[in-house]
Image (cartoon, rainbow, N blue to C red):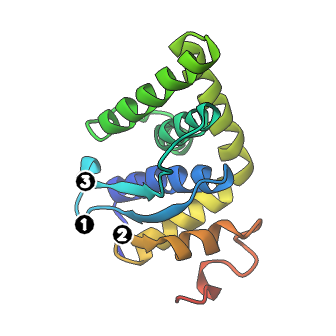
Amino acid sequence: MRLTDDLRRIAIHEAAHAVVADALGLIVCGIETPEEGAPEAAYTVLLAPTRMAAAEHLLHVAVAHAGFMAEQREDKQARPHPGLIKDQVDADDHAKAYAAAFDLLTDEAHLRGMKLARLVLTQRWPVVVAVAEALMAHDGQLDGAQVRELCASDDPEVGGVESLSWE
């Protein structure tokens, strides 16, 4: 089991992307984190539609911001790191598309996405932790079915990681 602080931070970050995406109705295909602390090598894969409605861009803004927001919840001293660059680029691309469709400023789109991410993280924090712990316990890899099974639980303490069918 990988338990270093850096790997936990990365697992929390990626788990937050996955849990927020799942809660917002996006399809999570899997999560992978590196063996050693290289945050830029971690990723959460979502099934992307061939065409995205304007409002769906806001969901992706929320998912992109969720990772670092979860790091900050876990550690108030969390600071930006190189792994956040791809999240910021993704958030900015979707924020621009959302803002253009609704005649908003890009900053307003970012704020709306962050509010949405914060709401989901607040309501689903125990699930974020359960997904992160499962990720660390399974050598940094979970497939979409495993993530969805964890996200389906409103209370990961009941049943919890130990009772999952893929254990």
Marks 3 and 2 close (CB-CB < 8 Å): no
Q: Residue 35 — which label? A: 1
The numbered mark, 2 or 1, whose residue comes first in the sequence reads 1
Q: What x and y, as percent, mark residue 151?
A: 65, 65
Q: Which residue is drawn at 67% across and 59% down?
A: 126
On the question of residue 79 being in view, the answer is no
Cα–Cα span, label 2 and label 1: 7 Å
On the question of residue 103 being in view, the answer is yes
| Nearer the camera: disc 1 or disc 3 | 3
Q: What x and y, as percent, mark residue 12?
A: 48, 54
Query: For the residue marked with disc 1, what is the amino acid?
Result: Glu
Marks 2 and 1 close (CB-CB < 8 Å): yes
Q: In this view, does 37 lie to the left or right of 44?
A: left
Q: Residue 140 — which label? A: 2
Q: Name the residue carrying label 3.
A: 41
Query: For the residue marked with disc 2, what is the amino acid?
Result: Gly
Q: What x and y, as percent, mark residue 4?
A: 33, 61
User: Element at badge 3?
Assistant: helix
Q: Residues within 10 Å of mark 3 (few under 14, many from 20)?
A: few
Q: Residues within 10 Å of mark 1 (few under 14, many from 20)?
A: few
Using the image as rendered, state which of residue 149 and residue 129 is in the foreground.
149
Q: Is residue 49 above or below residue 59?
A: below
